Amino acid sequence: MEGDEEKKKQNKKKIFLTSISAVVAETSTFPLDITKTRLQLYYGGDGSSSSTVNAFRVASEIVKKEGVMGMYRGLSASVCRHIFYTPIRIVGYEHLRNSFGNDSLSLPQKAFLGGVSGVIAQVLASPADLVKVRMQADGRLMRQGLQPRYTGIFDALNKIVKTEGVGGLWRGVVPNMQRAFLVNMGELACYDHAKRFVIGKQVCDDNIYAHTLASTMSGLAATALSCPADVVKTRMMNQAAGNEANKIMYRNSYDCLVKTVRVEGVMALWKGFFPTWARLGPWQFVFWVSYERLRNIAGLSSF
């Protein structure tokens, strides 16, 4: 009984520390996330020269037309999402990994467990992710002199439920799940495996250098695997059912994938790769270094 109580206390600590680390990482890198989202929402064939659009130009337009605070539009929804999403996937993965025999697992096995934990977490956090994408995309309406669709998280949730039903909160959940599986397959498994590799090969001890190397590798792997699903997810989630100002372009995620490739080419699936990687790298670094350090302070074992 005492052992069970101790495990519960440790899990509560892990959840709390994960939430803190995620909020710090998300706030620090959010401008890169909104740049990536706006870049992915540049559609080919609509009169815009999407092939010439880059992350720097998108970021410059946001600051010029919406002010510096425009780079943080949707931050509240994003922070809310990570308070649920990150603890579930991180603690969930660690629990699954330890249950199946930590040291005996191969990289593909860890990748699968990471993907499963990510899918579970993403389904639960999908409404907050939807609100974040919609609020980030509202800046395009403001640039056209139109009123934004939502004034805040609760206004967005209320309007989405009224116009699209409760199920509307999970619009784009399928590509979201696909992306979550790929992201966490690359991120969690790669970080875990890379850290153990550099420590096992005595490249460095279990310290900030090991965490930095591992987080850099995991950020690159997660970006390369997840970018196509991320593009589809962003475009699907930005669609509002029954909204004439934002007409439905895609019937489902497959239709979105096909039309994107047909109109803009295969490389459009990696649109926003650089800002995604530029964000995931620092996000991974800030999160894992903060989390590992906080675990050490709290007397918990390394991840």
Image (spheres, rainbow, N blue to C red):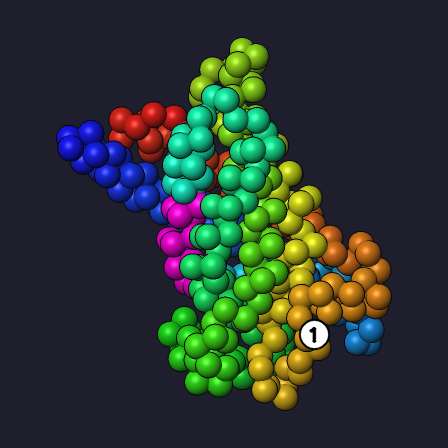
The image position of residue 292, as x and y in percent, is 39, 31
Q: At 59% across and 86% down in the image, what residue appears? A: 243
Query: Mark 1 packing: few (<14 Cα in 10 Å), some, or many (20+)?
Result: some
Magenta-span inclusion, residue 86 = yes
Residue 278 shows in the view: no
Task: Let me know if residue 223 is in the magenta part.
Answer: no
**Quadrant where the image shows the N terminus:** top left
Above or below residue 255? Residue 246 is below
Q: Nearer the viewer, residue 100 or 280?
A: 100
Pinpoint residue 38: horizontal percent, then vertical percent.
Answer: 64, 64
**What's the amino acid at mark 1?**
Tyr
Quarter holding residue 207: top left
Looking at the rendered image, the quarter that the C terminus falls into is top left
Q: Position of residue 259 (x, y in %)?
A: 78, 69
Q: Main secondary structure of the magenta part?
A: helix
Q: Which residues are magenta?
A: 74-89
Residue 98: percent from left, percent from top: 40, 30
